[in-house]
Every structure is written in structure tokens, then in C-alpha cells.
Amino acid sequence: MVTWCFNVKGFQVLWSDFFADNPASGRVMEKCGFRDTGEVNWCSHLYHGDERPVKVMRLDYSLD
């Protein structure tokens, strides 16, 4: 999916996030090349309406 987004769709940056209390999701994203931005947002849309922190990840296109 990452390759398709960069090579077919032409994206230069991909953004993702995960619930802070689920660090395993963050590790999966890191294995795909995403890096922690240090930003934390609050999400109330997905988990019973409770505001929960999500950590923001970023992956930049690279020719490497």
C-alpha cells in the first residue's frame, strides 16, 4: 500500500496515527518506515466517543 501511494498516486508524504495505549500499532508503522512526529491529537470518533490520545506518525517519500 505504501509503495502504491508513492509510486502510483504520487503522494510525497503519508500520515498515520495510533492510539497511545496501543504501542504495538506504532511499532508496526515503524517497521513500514513511519516515524513518530512527537504530535499527539485527541480522537473521539472511534472508541465509544471517549477522547483518547493518538500519536501521529509520518512517512516521507524517498528515492532510496
Image (tube, helix red, strand yellow):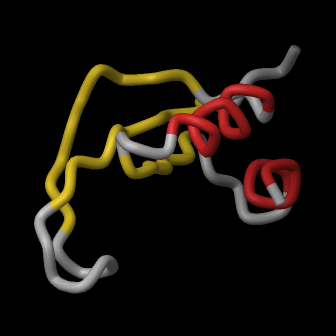
Q: In this view of the protein, which residue sits in the foreground, 44 or 63?
A: 44
37 left or right of 22 in image: left
Locate residue 46: give its quadrant: bottom left
- The residue most toward the top is 64
Q: In this view of the protein, which residue sits in the foreground, 62 or 31?
A: 31
Residue drawn at (67%, 38%), measured in percent from left and top?
29
Residue 19 lies, with reference to residue 4, above or below; the image says: above
Q: Which quadrant is home to the N terminus?
A: bottom right
Report x, y in % for residue 33: 73, 27
Report x, y in % for residue 57: 46, 35
Q: Which quadrant is home to the C terminus?
A: top right
Q: In this view of the protein, which residue sits in the foreground, 9 or 32?
A: 32
25 left or right of 15 in image: right
Residue 14 lies, with reference to residue 50, above or below; the image says: above
Residue drawn at (85%, 59%), measured in percent from left and top?
4
Counting every numbered tag in the picture gives 0
